[in-house]
């Protein structure tokens, strides 16, 4: 949540400042086809109402299955059938075994080749757009 706006809206990754304030919710403004489309990023899915869940389009996966406690579906496999899943990691880091076996798009950044961040982070929007068109075309985007 410290740098979600930098990553998703500005397509660049940077280190979190030492005195950074951690928001529980962030609004991302994305320019798409000449219009601004808002995306709400929340840190605590337990605060989502049942009607909110129909509008959830993506989840960032850390690895442990406990991350999905409180979701309206029982298993990560069921969740990833309905919601696009992404995992962000540095290229030299080992991938979590759960992430490896789940239907998760892994986005890798390099600590030394920061000029490649934008291209790597564009993968998120490309995959998400395809997911929304296929599974949630009723959403305005």
Image: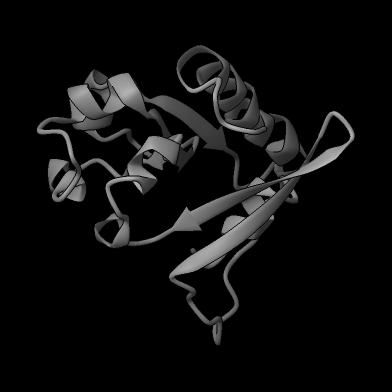
Report which quarter residue 56 is drawn in: top left
The image position of residue 102, as x and y in percent, is 25, 22
How many labels, in total? 0
* Residue that protrudes farthest toward the top in the picture: 134
Report which quarter residue 82 is drawn in: top left
Asked if residue 35 is positioned above or below residue 70 in the image, the reply reads above
> Which residue appears at 84% of the width and 39% of the height?
35
- Horizontal side, residue 66 vs residue 16: left or right: left
The image position of residue 127, as x and y in percent, is 56, 21
Which residue occupies the foreground of this view, 33 or 123? 33
Q: Which quadrant is the C terminus positioned in?
A: top right
> Which residue appears at 49% of the width and 74% of the height?
23
- Horizontal side, residue 140 vs residue 2: left or right: right
* Residue that protrudes farthest toward the left in the picture: 74
Asked if residue 83 is positioned above or below residue 42 in the image, the reply reads above
The image position of residue 14, as x and y in percent, is 65, 60
Which residue occupies the foreground of this view, 8 or 31? 31
Report which quarter residue 16 is drawn in: bottom right
* Residue that protrudes farthest toward the right in the picture: 34
> Which residue appears at 19% of the width and 22% of the height?
77
> Which residue appears at 55% of the width and 27% of the height?
128
- Horizontal side, residue 76 vs residue 110: left or right: left
The image position of residue 90, as x and y in percent, is 49, 42
The type of colouring in the image is one colour
């Amino acid at each position: 949540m410290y740098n979600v706006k930098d990553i998703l809206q500005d397509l660049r990754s940077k280190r979190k400042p030492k005195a950074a304030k951690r928001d529980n919710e962030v609004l991302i403004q994305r320019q798409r086809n000449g219009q601004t489309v808002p995306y709400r990023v929340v840190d605590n899915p337990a605060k989502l109402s049942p009607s909110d869940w129909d509008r959830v389009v993506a989840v960032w996966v850390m690895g442990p299955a406990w991350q999905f406690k409180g979701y309206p579906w029982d298993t990560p496999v069921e969740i990833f059938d309905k919601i696009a899943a992404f995992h962000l990691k540095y290229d030299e880091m080992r991938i979590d075994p759960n992430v490896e076996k789940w239907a998760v798009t892994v986005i890798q950044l390099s600590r030394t080749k920061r000029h490649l961040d934008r291209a790597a982070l564009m993968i998120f929007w490309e995959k998400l757009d395809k997911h929304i068109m296929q599974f949630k075309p009723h959403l305005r985007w």
